[in-house]
Amino acid sequence: MNKKWSLLLAVVMIASLILTACGGGATEADCAEEDVLCVGLVTDVGEVDDKSFNQSAWEGVQQAGEELDAIVNYVETKDAKDYMANMQLFIDKGYDVIVTVGYAMGTATTEAAAANPDVLFIGVDQGQWGDVLPNLAGLIFHEDQSGYLAGVLAAKMTQTNTIAAVLGTDLIPPVVAFKEGYEAGARSVNPDINIISTYHPGGLDVAFTDPEWGATTAAQAIANGADVIFGAGGKTGNGALIEVAGTPGLYCIGVDSDQWETVPEAHACLISSAMKLITPAVVDLINLANEGNFPGGNYFGAAGLAPYHDFEDAIPQDVQDLIDSTAAGLLDGSITTGYGG
């Protein structure tokens, strides 16, 4: 066998392993069977291993797949016009649950759910308002609250009285919520703090996949005196974190997941991350689907700050105590972020 055909055979074998990684030997061909659970994920524009939003959702699908002995698979979206077609790939194969990632997929997901009432859909970051569909759960979070905690931390850790945020597009409400919460949290402890917040100027197709812009924008903020920078924008935000890590003595804050685990290049500056606990929430919803208790409408996942990891000793105890009391106040409603959504 020549090298060309050996390589082709290896690719086919690897693809087969991916498709049957879970499911006790079942394959996609069995997805129409009642006793076989199949879960598919469609990413927003970008890769499934983006070290942020798509990856967190996919990890939830994989974890649920292992727990439930389910078949799991994903499709990466390269262009927004392909949202519906990518979901249809799973629908045609008889998948039971389809997870779609990101606010931008909301309209397409609602249309697919309405047209396929026997398929359950989980729309990550897709709020369901007005008339809701019983087979569509919008997994949403209080991003303003985790952003608020990040702002408190940033305001307490700055030495220059200037902090910054490098953000994805303001076309996405959760990104706006992170920004507004971050600024409100910082000003709650330091009303006179200088905050440099910058949205990516591009559209949905580039705003979260532009680490070069993220790095350049972070560098500009550093030049203007910022010594704590919040990166909230997928790979764009990751670019900002990595840029900050290259300058000793500065701090950075990640987003969505605990980015200590996903962006090791930022360890030199990463004091915490403003988290949306996407992975466990996706697991919970898939389990509810499997149990026959699927909740249509909005489903709130948990939000909060990630551990401080190697910076545990660098963050004064009174600051850690303030973060804890603030988190409790946000949870019981005694503290509000002021964000109206």
Image (tube, rainbow, N blue to C red):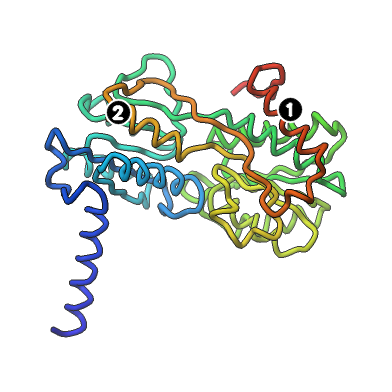
Q: Relative to the observer, which residue lies in front, 200 or 259?
A: 259
Q: Indicate the position of residue 174 as horizontal and vertical percent values.
A: 55, 33
- Left or right: 124 in relation to 52: left
Q: Which quadrant, please, contains the N terminus?
A: bottom left
Q: Relative to the observer, which residue lies in front, 291 or 208?
A: 291
Residue type highlighted by circle 1 = Ser
**Kind of element beneath mark 1:** helix
Q: Quadrant of residue 9?
A: bottom left
Give the CA separation, mark 1 to mark 2: 35 Å
Disc with the residue nearer the chain's start (1 vs 2) = 2
Q: Which quadrant, please, contains the C terminus?
A: top right
Name the residue located 31 percent from the left edge and 21 percent from the top edge: 293
**Kind of element beneath mark 2:** helix
- The count of marks equals 2
Residue type highlighted by circle 2 = Ala
Decide: is 235 above or below 7: above
Q: Indicate the position of residue 89 as horizontal and vertical percent values.
A: 22, 44
Q: Indicate the position of residue 74 as horizontal and vertical percent values.
A: 31, 48
Decide: is 132 above or below 303: above
Which residue position is annotated with label 2?
A: 289
Which residue position is annotated with label 1?
A: 325
